[in-house]
Image (cartoon, helix red, strand yellow):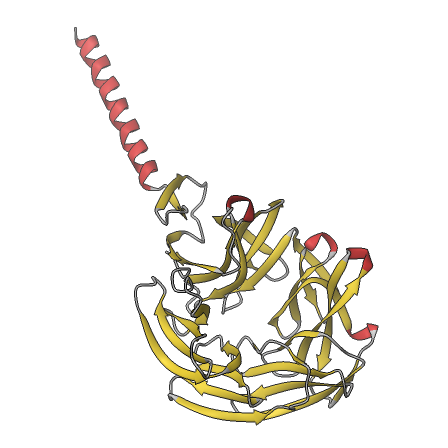
C-alpha cells in the first residue's frame, strides 16, 4: 500500500514539474505580428533558441488610399520629425498655386497637424534629425525651413537653365545637403554641397558626366558619392555607376580610377568616412566597400533595397527569394560583416525605408507583393514597424 502511495506521489510530482516547465516555455515565446489585407493583426507565436534582437511590438498600417481617392490631393510620408511623429506631405491639386502642406502625423496614424504651407515646391527633403526641410521652388530657389525655429529662408538661386536635378540628399549627421544639376544644352554639370552649420555652399564643376541620379556626402564633408545612370546591353537596360569625389577640389573629371562599382540601384551610403554600402549588379549583392583597402565584401545577395539605422549599427533590407516574393529583414552591422539576420515582414516591397531617430521604429513606403495584389495601384502603401 505504501509503495502504491509513493508511486502516485512521484507521478503527481513529475506532472507538476513538467507543467511548470511548459508554462515557462510558453511565456518565453516571441511574437511576430503581420497585418492581413483587412488591416487586422494576426499574431504568430515562434520559439527561437535565443532572444530576438529585433523583437516586434506592433505593426501599424496607414490607409492613405482614401485620401487620394478623389485625386484632388495626394499624400507622401517622407521621414521622421522625431521619435513619435512622421513627416507627411500633401499636394493639393485643386489649389491655384499648387499648394503643399507639410504635416506632422503620429506613427500610429491617429492624428495629423499642419506644420507649414508652401506654394509650388518641386523637390522636398527632410533631414535625418527631423529639424530641417529643404525644397526647391518654381522660381528656382533653394529654400530651407527650420522646424525648431519655425523659420523659412532662401539658401540660394539655382541656375535657371539646368535640365535636370538629382534628389536632395543629406549626410548621416544632417549637416550637409547635396545634389547635382545638369545642363545638357550648355554641357555643364555642377555639384552643390550646402553646409547647414556654417551656411556655406560649395560648388564643384563636373567634367564628362551626365545623367546623375544621386549625390551623398560623408559626415566630415570631404568625400562625395556620385551615382550616374548608364545603359548596359549586358544587363539589358540601365545600370548605375558609383564614383568617389574629392570635395576639396573645385573640379572633378570622370574616369575609371574614380569609379568604385556598378550598382543595380542608385542607393549608396557611407557608414563611416571610409566604408560604403551599396548593391552590386553581380547577384544583386549587398556589398561593403573599404576605401582604405579598396576591397569589397559581399554581405548578402538578391537584395533590392536597404537603409541603415541612424546610429549606423543596424540595417534593414528587402530580399527576393523568388519572383515577385520580397521579404524584409533586419541585421546588425559589425566591422566587416552583418549578423543576427531576422525576418521582419513578409510580402512587401519597400521603395523607401526610414528609421526613427531612436532606432526603435521603421517607416516603410512601398507596395504589397504584386503576386498577392490584383488591385495594383501606383500609390505607395505605408507601414510602421515598432520594436520592443
Q: Residue at x 51, y 78 (%)?
A: 124
Q: Residue at x 49, y 78 (%)?
A: 127
| Relative to 177, residue 79 above or below | above
Say if residue 269 shows up in the picture: yes
On the rendered structure, is 40 left or right of 322?
A: left
x and y percent of residue 150 in the render? 37, 88
On the rendered structure, is 58 left or right of 309?
A: left
Q: State the image quarter where residue 230 is shown.
A: bottom right
| Relative to 253, residue 111 above or below | above
Say if residue 198 shows up in the picture: no
| Relative to 16, residue 348 above or below | below
| Relative to 363, residue 38 above or below | above
On the rendered structure, is 335 left or right of 61?
A: right
| In front of the other: 122 or 28 | 122
x and y percent of residue 190 in the render? 70, 86
x and y percent of residue 147 in the render? 40, 83
Q: State the quadrant of the C terminus.
A: bottom left
Q: State the quadrant of the N terminus.
A: top left
| In front of the other: 225 or 180 | 180
Q: Residue at x 61, y 81 (%)?
A: 178
Residue reaching furthest top?
1
Task: Give the number of callouts.
Answer: 0
| In front of the other: 222 or 364 | 364
x and y percent of residue 363 in the render? 45, 62
| In front of the other: 258 or 327 | 327
Amino acid at each position: 500500500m505504501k509503495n502504491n502511495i509513493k508511486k502516485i506521489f512521484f507521478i503527481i510530482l513529475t506532472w507538476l514539474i513538467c507543467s511548470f516547465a511548459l508554462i515557462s516555455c510558453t511565456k518565453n515565446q516571441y511574437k511576430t505580428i503581420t497585418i492581413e489585407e483587412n488591416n487586422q493583426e494576426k499574431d504568430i507565436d515562434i520559439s527561437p533558441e535565443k532572444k530576438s534582437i529585433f523583437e516586434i511590438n506592433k505593426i501599424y498600417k496607414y490607409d492613405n488610399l482614401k485620401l487620394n481617392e478623389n485625386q484632388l490631393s495626394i499624400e507622401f510620408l517622407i521621414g521622421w520629425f522625431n521619435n513619435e511623429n512622421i513627416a507627411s506631405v500633401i499636394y493639393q491639386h485643386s489649389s491655384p498655386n499648387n499648394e503643399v502642406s507639410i504635416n506632422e502625423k503620429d506613427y500610429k496614424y491617429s492624428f495629423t497637424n499642419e506644420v507649414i504651407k508652401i506654394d509650388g515646391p518641386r523637390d522636398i527633403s527632410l533631414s535625418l534629425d527631423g529639424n530641417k526641410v529643404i525644397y526647391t521652388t518654381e522660381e528656382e530657389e533653394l529654400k530651407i525651413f527650420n522646424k525648431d525655429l519655425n523659420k523659412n529662408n532662401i539658401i540660394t538661386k539655382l541656375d535657371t537653365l539646368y535640365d535636370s536635378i538629382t534628389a536632395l540628399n543629406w549626410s548621416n549627421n544632417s549637416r550637409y545637403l547635396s545634389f547635382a544639376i545638369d545642363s545638357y544644352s550648355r554641357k555643364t554639370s555642377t555639384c552643390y554641397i550646402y553646409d547647414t552649420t556654417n551656411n556655406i555652399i560649395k560648388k564643384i564643376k563636373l567634367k564628362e558626366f551626365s545623367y546623375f541620379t544621386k549625390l551623398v556626402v560623408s559626415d566630415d564633408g570631404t568625400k562625395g558619392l556620385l551615382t550616374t545612370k548608364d545603359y548596359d546591353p549586358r544587363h539589358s537596360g540601365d545600370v548605375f555607376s558609383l564614383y568617389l569625389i574629392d570635395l576639396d577640389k573645385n573640379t572633378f573629371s570622370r574616369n575609371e580610377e574614380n569609379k568604385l562599382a556598378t550598382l543595380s540601384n542608385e542607393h549608396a551610403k557611407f557608414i563611416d568616412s571610409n566604408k560604403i554600402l551599396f548593391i552590386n549588379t553581380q547577384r544583386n549583392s549587398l556589398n561593403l566597400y573599404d576605401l582604405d583597402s579598396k576591397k569589397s565584401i559581399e554581405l548578402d545577395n538578391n537584395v533590392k533595397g536597404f537603409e541603415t539605422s541612424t546610429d549606423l549599427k543596424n540595417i534593414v533590407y528587402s530580399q527576393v527569394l523568388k519572383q515577385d516574393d520580397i521579404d524584409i529583414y533586419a541585421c546588425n552591422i559589425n566591422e566587416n560583416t552583418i549578423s543576427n539576420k531576422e525576418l521582419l515582414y513578409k510580402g512587401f516591397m519597400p521603395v523607401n525605408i526610414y528609421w526613427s531617430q531612436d532606432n526603435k521604429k521603421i517607416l516603410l513606403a512601398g507596395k504589397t507583393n504584386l503576386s498577392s495584389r490584383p488591385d495594383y495601384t501606383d500609390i505607395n502603401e505605408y507601414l510602421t514597424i515598432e520594436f520592443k
